[in-house]
């Protein structure tokens, strides 16, 4: 079948579409997306049971119905996100994808690309190459993902993992760290979705790879 496609493309003079996102990236990306959404919505319900600030999230955007139900959803999504995220990092490092896609990154490059992005002049012609702003965001969200899991574990098992809770400065501070990591992930998702809507071919590449 592939030989037929290759023959057809050669006969028509049209080169086969370049693979932008390999299958393992696409599968893990969508698993992470689902896990993050489940964790955020259930996390908002958990937050409502003991809010850190003078506001609560609307029940229409929370998951679980009540504290116990939200905790069940949160823990289930936590393991999905942690295991899939760990696999993503391991494969990304082993295949050299992170090195090729996310490095090098320079302060000057970030400033130039950020200025272009804010003035809507940032080019998205070559989806196989990340600009400096994308590199910074992706590296940042990986770091935040690690931090949100660790702070979550510190909150979940403050006695069994008291050394981890102590690293965050105690249970209460770990809750604030967890909350602000969640806020950073939500902000990343908003930007990520906005870019996908503005550059539809990037979304297509994450679905079909090309």
Image: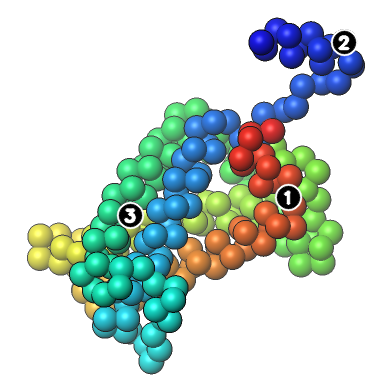
Nearer-N-terminus badge (1/2)? 2
Quarter of the view holding residue 76: bottom left
Vertical placement of residue 113 versus 14, above or below: below
Disc nearer the start of the sequence (1/3): 3
Residue wearing tag 2: 11
> What x and y, as percent, mark residue 187?
54, 68
Q: What is the x, y in percent for residue 194?
A: 67, 62
Q: Secondary structure at mark 2?
A: helix
Real-space Cα distance between discs 1 and 2? 29 Å
**Separation (CA) of disc 1 from disc 3:** 28 Å
Q: Residues within 10 Å of mark 2 (few under 14, many from 20)?
A: few
Q: Residue at x 33, y 43 (%)?
A: 83
Residue 182 shows up from this direction? yes
Q: Secondary structure at mark 3?
A: helix
Are discs 1 and 3 less than 8 Å apart at CB? no
Query: Would you place residue 92 above or below residue 37 in this image?
Result: above
| Residue 200 tag number | 1
Determine crowd level at label 1: few under 14, some 14-19, many 20+ residues with C-alpha closer than 10 A: few
Residue 170 sits in which quadrant? bottom left
């Amino acid at each position: 079948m592939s030989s037929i496609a290759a023959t057809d493309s050669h006969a028509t003079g049209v080169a086969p579409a370049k693979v932008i996102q390999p299958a393992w990236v696409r599968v893990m990306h969508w698993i992470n997306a689902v896990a993050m959404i489940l964790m955020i919505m259930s996390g908002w319900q958990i937050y409502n049971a003991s809010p850190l600030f003078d506001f609560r999230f609307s029940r229409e955007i929370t998951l679980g119905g009540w504290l116990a139900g939200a905790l069940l959803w949160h823990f289930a999504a936590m393991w999905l996100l942690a295991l899939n995220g760990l696999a993503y990092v391991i494969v990304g490092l082993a295949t050299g994808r992170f090195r090729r896609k996310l490095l090098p990154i320079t302060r000057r490059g970030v400033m130039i690309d950020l200025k272009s992005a804010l003035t809507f002049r940032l080019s998205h012609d070559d989806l196989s190459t990340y600009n400096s702003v994308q590199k910074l965001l992706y590296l940042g969200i990986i770091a935040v993902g690690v931090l949100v899991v660790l702070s979550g574990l510190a909150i979940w098992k403050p006695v069994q993992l008291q050394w981890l809770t102590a690293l965050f400065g105690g249970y209460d501070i770990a809750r604030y760290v967890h909350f602000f990591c969640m806020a950073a992930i939500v902000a990343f998702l908003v930007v990520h979705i906005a870019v996908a809507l503005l550059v539809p071919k990037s979304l297509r590449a994450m679905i079909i790879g090309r």
